[in-house]
Amino acid sequence: MPFINSLTELVHLQEEILQRKREEITSQPFRDGGPEKFAPLALRADQELDAPRGKEIRVVLRNCTLIDPESLDDYIAEDGYQALATVLTKMTPEEVIDTISRSGLRGRGGAGFPTGRKWQLTRNSAGSPKYIICNADEGDPGAFMNRRVLEGDPHSVLEGMAIAAYAIGASQGYIYCRAEYPIAVRTLNIAIQQARAYGLLGKNVLASGFSFDVELRMGAGAFVCGEETALIASIEGRRGEPRPRPPFPAVSGLWGNPTCINNVETFANVPQIILTGPDWFAAMGTEKSKGTKTFALAGDVNHTGLIEVPLGITLREIVYDVGEGIKKNKALKAIQTGGPMGGCLPASMIDLPVDYESLTAAGSIMGSGGMIVMDEETCMVDIARFFMEFIQEESCGKCTPCRVGTHSMLEILTRICNGEGVDGDIEELERLCKVTKTHSLCGLGQGAPNPVESTIKHFRHEYEAHIYRKECPAKVCRALIRYEIVPETCTGCTVCAKNCPIGAINGERRNPHLIDQEICIRCGICIQTCNFGAILALTGEQN
Amino acid sequence: MPFIFINGQPYQVREDTNLLRAAQEAGISIPSLCDHPDLTPYGGCRLCNVEVKGLRLPAAACMLPVTDGMEVYTETEDLVEARKSILKLLLKNYYDSGNGNADKPNALLKWCDYYGVDTSQWTRKEPRYAIDSDPNPFIRVDLNKCILCTRCIRACAEVQGRFVWGLAERGFDSQIVAGSGVTLLEARCESCGACVEYCPTGALTHKPSFGAELPEKKVQTTCAYCGVGCNFDLNVKDNRVIKVTSNPNAPVNGVHLCVKGRYGYQYIQHPDRLRSPQVREYLLKGMPKPPAGESPWVTVSWDTALNLAANKLAAIKRESGPDAIALLSSAKCTNEENYLMNKLARQVIGTHNIDHCARLCHSSTVAGLGMSFGSGAMTNTVADIVEHAQAIFIIGSNTTEQHPVIGSKIRQAVLRRKVKLIVADPRRVDIAEFAQIYLRQKPGTDVALINGLMHIILKNNWQDQAFIDQRCENFDAFREVVEKYPPELVSKITGVTEKDLYKTAETLASNKPAAVFWAMGITQHTTGVLNVLTLANLQMLLGNMGVPGGGVNPLRGQNNVQGACDMGGLPNVFPGYQSVTNEAVLEKFNLAWQTTHADGSTPPLFNNKAGLTSTEMIPMAGTGKVRALVILGENPVMTEPDANHTRECLEACEFIVLQEIFPSETSHYADVLLPGVTFAEKEGTFTNTERRIQMVRQAIQPEGETRPDWEILADLAKRILAVEKRRPTGSHAGWDYASAAEVMDEIAAVTPIYAGVSHARLNTGAQLHWPVKDLNHSGTPILHIGEFTRGKGKFHPTEHLDPQELPDAEYPFLLTTGRVLYHWHAGEMTRRSQGLLDVYPDAYIEIHPEDAEALGILDHQQVRLSSRRGIALGKALITERVSPGLIFANFHFAGEQNGNNLTIAALDPVSKIPEFKICAVKLEVS
């Protein structure tokens, strides 16, 4: 096992590895136009991460799918740890912070706090030891940007953490990873061991006098532990509950000491910024939002999965170029960004640039990178109910507005979806949104009303339809819809009857069928299986 | 001092405080539910959210540090609206099944009322949880009223240091749970009731007083259980004590109390109380005395009872001399009563044969510390130690069970200040959980253990040589002996590893000041005085004397055992430790207490030889050398060692006058029973373990015909003097006291260390630790600053000696005795407080699992212990608290369950304290 003592040795090692790989490649049989072991990118891509499309640029995801995540040599071959070596041998901590500040990198966990400034604040704080924490508690439903980086390129995160540690004056780091990511936990642990073995972590890194080690801590399934103060409480062995800030972790964090917490994606950007320079990074994005951002693109687009795009890209470019348009050419209804605490943006905002300020101004958030595209068949009340269900379950219960407010909102939303909404429900929701948003302790509660508020703002008519006309315009809410077979169109093929899970459809072969409304559970399987468009969903007065 | 603006007005506020506190201090009310000044801020209820200029969102005032120039708005329209919403949200999960705590305001309802939120409209209409869901006899749990403020959780963790309460689930399903969702007692609840005290809504209430009416009055007084000296309010309605409530102004304990203090009050007006004087029938009929207990009791008038006692005592004195009478004073009674008892013995009867239960607990401390420093009491205060000590060394004290509030304060010091705690005890007592180092020395090896530590300290030159040189003497002789205790030898004697010895010595040497605490584990040995001298040596060696956060701190057991000693309830000293062998002192008291006989003569009142100790007077009662015993509120049958022998002695005693509140195991042997009162029925003072003198205030009228004990004593004294035709003529010789306050004035006049004490001072809030030199002196919280009471501190070389009776083939187990949290001493009070008995109903005998297995003993099985002196029955409690071969029994239960049936009356040669901690026993399934 090589123990690396300097930047020069690291570069030599890289040359050796590359030479070895070249030899391996030339001795490999070719397949599909490339050596078998190093098949072209497209062949190694998968459902989660496909070849870049549209305006995609891969910075954070640069190595994912390209290198073996369990091989430190692979990472070194891709210039791995050269940024750390450069920092340790050629830069002062102040210069590192200055470089990061000039790059314009902002926290990718969602809040977008300037990373350089956070490092500077932690560095300036009195108190020792200081700590670096990597927040790998990615909990947004459907989001897996961080997981992919941890599983595919763990050393980029470790290297970023080590650089941050040098900058703020820390010698111990923690990665707080959700336990639901067993592969990430495995690759990280392997990576930590390898980096220690190579002298890239531990005492006297690269013989520079700088010491830094990393310990992995696993979460226990609480979404709120993504909140930094709750995360710290959890590492300390306490119940994962947030506490009010100030003091911010930069002043009083882990065990009361100055602590810098950054997200996986933030750290993964750092080595590239050091190696390629802040100007390169700042050239991407908008005036205030620099670089790229990864998103987990989901919902009703043709191409779903992880994407990485320069900030400032419009929603339209994401949906139609990268996402290759709405499935079945249906109409776009809304885009939800930022995870469960994000807002729903209506199709009319399709040309909104994706950057921190624009999204916030539009009533949503950047968040950590969830992006759900919804077509015309989506019920926005139901969507709000769905997110509120998640949030009220994940509320830690510490503060009153979040604990009871989210529960109360869910009660009302459920009532509305069940066709039991009453006059005043919208106003009550608005009141609850206000108190929860303004008076909750942490970001979870403060963001909880976003799905409700934004859907009321942009789709108030849908709420009103549910409450006053007992109608679900998107024909989703089961209590408000009814399926009916149009006798003229029905061919009596029996497919619907065969597929109905509760046998609610009767009829003779080749004769029009009939749905027994008494036992129909509105599952919608019939409408999906009918090949003749003979089944209609009816709501409201049609109902 | 930062300047802040609250609602546009400038205020100068303290630094290092939060906005809520700063506003409160400025007289501005901000609503809050989860905050309490004693507890770490939580920021959960959000009711105290305020608007702060420059902050995007409102912030919780309770967690917002004040900064200079801060501009805050506390009651804007938006905030009022939000607070109404938050209160409604809280009510949404609040179901009120009625208020069982009429005099405690419900903070939630108070704020609803303040903000005009209609509670009837918003509260739940049916309960969500079981009402009264926990079987704990003291703490009533009704989660329907819980608003999840977590004050209970924080109180349990931060005040009691027990971590029983926690939060389970999350979001709307969050709820407080004991342990991992078990009952409170299963979750190791100590039933201190702190969680109840801090609960703002009545989700937790005191079960024994649930539904009690509003009290007519609350009387602040001092607890009558242990020596911590907690204060609380007795709540009275229709002349009945309906409950005890915390008083935040209590100087020692604040709102905190232990289970006995808070809930053990039912005995006060228990049906068993003695309510009128009684004498044995044979006395009235002039018949010879039949065997003890056979002559029936006859209820008589006070005159009859007191005249009979006075005549009989006078007759015995006339026939056999004053020393044929011996008196047992009472550490449960007030200073005033103990003073009168001492005066009764010395002035009226003319004997120094007076002692009390301090003989059995800290006589070795008083003797040992007297030899080392010239003063035998705790040197520092608890608050001082908790605030200033860097290390605390507890040896032979089960602090959390025996001095629970001090125990919790030590836990707090460990939790909050990371004080290094070292615990040495053959039993792994609860406080060991908080210790950095726990040493399980073999019983009876304390001298060797401490000498071993000092050997290491000297070897490494860690001693405070300057302190030793300037303030101590006899160092070289001491050093010579300590050199004989190298770690290898000490490890062999004590069973403590050399590594632990070294670690302990190093911790003590590198964390100064260090305070040493001890209790019966040190004192109740034939080497009791040697043990104490050795600990005194240790503290001198480290220079920990006369400094804040240091000192020698014997924890006194009874509520007023310190006072009973101070008041001359000892055979060798007058009040204030004025020696009976000192001629000047004798002269002083002969004058002060002078009586003039019918013939005009004023012969000396007493001789100049120390009287009998309790451990001597009872055996001598058995031989007839002592013909009469006058006992004030003690129960020697239960508490003396070798109870069977005690019974024989009392049986043989000619005449016993017993002043008591209950018929006791000792009253079986008494001839005259004088019904005294509890602390709730009289005035007086108790002196706590810190030498702090505190008021005992009358809350209710005495039960039945009972009279305050000081009145009874004065009445008896006057009658004896009348029988003897003596007139009090000295300056302080009379017995006509109008109040206990007058007795205290007399105490002050003849007792230099109490010279500045008066009820008037105490009633106006003075916190006085003796010595209090005059009425302007503010007392002495820390002793020996600058100089020891005796001048130089004296090192005493001490050697390890084996205990008197060690296990052998016939009696293979070593028995050690003590008390438990839920009971007090001989159990007369706690066995008459139902809840305490519910939690701890039987005499449990602690047995190590290995021993239990070897003998086939199952948990809770009835077992029988026997020693050379008697047997004791109890239920097996199989636990690793004891080590293999060690058995622990208590003496709370009477008759065959009394652990003292087994103990040995082997005495320390100097202090005459018995070796309660060590004897040999046999264990069998019974």
Image: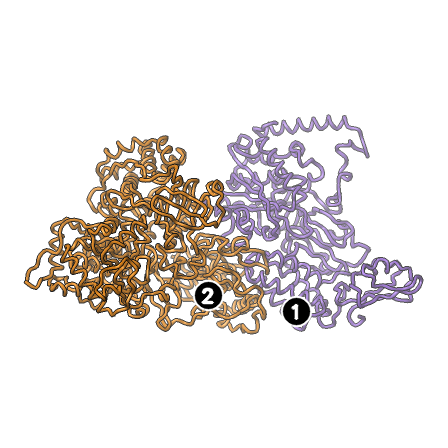
> Which chain wears purple?
A
2 and 1 marks in contact (CB < 8 Å) = no
Is B73 above or below relative to B516?
below
Q: Name which residue lies at 58% across and 36% down.
A: A84
Whole-angstrom CA distance, mark 2 to mark 1, is 31 Å
Q: Colour of chain B?
A: orange
The residue tagged with tag 2: helix, strand or loop? Answer: loop
- Position of B813 with respect to B589 (left or right) is right
Indicate the position of residue A292 as horizontal and vertical percent values. 66, 46
Return the mark for residue B30.
2
Looking at the rendering, which quadrant does residue B422 occupy? top left
Return the mark for residue A426.
1
**Residue B631 appears in the figure:** yes
Indicate the position of residue B149 as horizontal and vertical percent values. 50, 60
Labels 2, 1: one chain: no
In the image, A372 versus B601, the foreground residue is B601
Q: Amino acid under label 2?
A: Ile
Indicate the position of residue B600 as horizontal and vertical percent values. 5, 62
Q: How is the image coloured?
A: by chain
Chain label for disc 1: A
Q: Amino acid under label 1?
A: Ile
- Image quarter hosting the N terminus of chain B: bottom left
The residue tagged with tag 1: helix, strand or loop? Answer: helix
Chain label for disc 2: B
Crowd rating for badge 1 (residues with CA inside 10 Å; few <14, some 14–19, many 20+): many
In the image, A165 versus B466, the foreground residue is B466
